[in-house]
Amino acid sequence: MASPSIPAALRHPHAHAAGLRLLRSSGDPCPPCTLPFRLCGVPLKKGHVYAGAVSATRSPGLGNAENLRESPSLSRSWGMNGQIGDDHDILIECRDVHKSFGNKKVLNGISFKIRHGEAVGIIGPSGTGKSTVLKVMAGLLAPDKGDVIICGRKRHGLVSDEDISGVRIGLVFQSAALFDSLTVRENVGFLLYENSSLPEERIATLVTETLAAVGLKGVEDRMPSELSGGMKKRVALARSIIYDDTKETIEPEVILYDEPTAGLDPIASTVVEDLIRSVHVTGKDALGKPGKIASYVVVTHQHSTIKRAVDRLLFLHEGKVVWEGMTQEFTTSTNPIVKQFASGSLDGPIRYF
Ligand SMILES: Nc1ncnc2c1ncn2[C@@H]1O[C@H](COP(=O)(O)OP(=O)(O)OP(=O)(O)O)[C@@H](O)[C@H]1O
């Protein structure tokens, strides 16, 4: 397999400062925020969560304990359907999280837990804070107030090199957020090219295998502009699930998908929904291997995605979780907000104007 060509002369200055090999132009999206590098001003560090990839974190208890401290009140909690849940299986918890942009209050005391093995959907009216909550969970935005607790430890501020959480968190952006000036191979292998010592031939093999796992073959040398919207989403998915298979400790991984089926036709949506299921630990990928994603969270407006890709739902309204339940309970809920949303009625407590 030919190794990818990475023209060193075209390195982006920010990327160079961050030790990155692949970014080529100031128009490339900054991994943490997806703005072009020249606009964002966010210093990028290795291990930072980036579009469709994961934060490189280490096992609990290793490294700098300043960033993450034990949450003393985490001992037992109420789990799904009112059962008492052991807190040892909580991977991510948002506790009374608030976030404003200027005067606009977006998250208004949001609380929920994501447990090991869960497939959770976040739904709710437009502008209610769904994407914001994903970014807070991923550590790309810091809450103004409240706690984000990762594997029992509070995260302070943004995710960074020093973060130690014991869980890897990947965020697949709505727009797929591929680097336009990189090939598919370079996009999918981005994290490994930058953060692993794997030889390029091995990375190329992993890229090919991972692309096959999401149902794509022979596209490694294409540029993102040569792909359809559905293919871009699958490339972004591949980028989020590729990993260094020589690492001894594989932490549980949580993938956060922001509207993965938005803009896709019904059949392409089904393909992506099934892929999301298939990379979960309980499923099998397109190569028949067991999935390796411990849990995932999907923000979506699509009924098919709600029904096909997730088991439990959190309903956000005005920056709070106003209802949660299993997917099959959604259409029969008597909650007036949920009823209005499920039926698409203009009458009810949700007002757009
Ligand atoms: N970086 C930001 N700066 C300023 N305002 C922001 C920023 N990010 C989000 N907002 C605002 O916060 C509100 C919530 O945005 P968010 O994208 O989280 O909503 P959403 O529920 O995902 O919406 P949709 O379903 O339409 O995608 C919106 O009014 C949005 O304009």
Image (cartoon, rainbow, N blue to C red):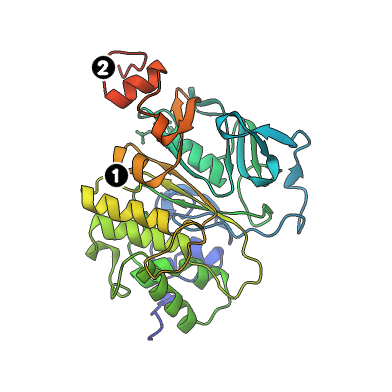
Residue 95 drawn at (x, y percent): 63, 31
Mark 1 residue's CB less than 8 Å from ligand 1: no
Residue 84 drawn at (x, y percent): 66, 33
Question: What residue is disc 2 on?
Answer: 346
3D distance between C-alphas at marks 2 and 1: 22 Å
Indicate the quadrant where residue 51 lies.
bottom left
Q: Report the amino acid beneath label 1.
A: Ala
At mark 2, the secondary structure is: loop
Q: Is residue 155 visible?
A: no
Q: Is residue 156 above or below residue 27?
A: above
**Residue at image x 56%, y 68%?**
19
Q: Earlier in the sequence, mark 2 or mark 1?
A: 1
Residue 273 drawn at (x, y percent): 34, 51
- Quadrant where the N terminus lies? bottom left
At mark 1, the secondary structure is: loop
Indicate the quadrant where residue 69 lies.
top right
Q: Is residue 229 above or below residue 125?
A: below
Q: Report the amino acid beneath label 2.
A: Leu
How packed is label 1: few (under 14 Cα within 10 Å), some, or many (20 or more)?
some
Question: What residue is disc 1 on?
Answer: 262
Q: Is residue 138 left or right of residue 223?
A: right
- Quadrant where the C terminus lies? top left
Q: Is residue 144 left or right of residue 190?
A: right
Residue 177 drawn at (x, y percent): 37, 54
Q: Which quadrant of the figure shows ligand 1?
A: top left
**Residue at image x 61%, y 49%?**
159
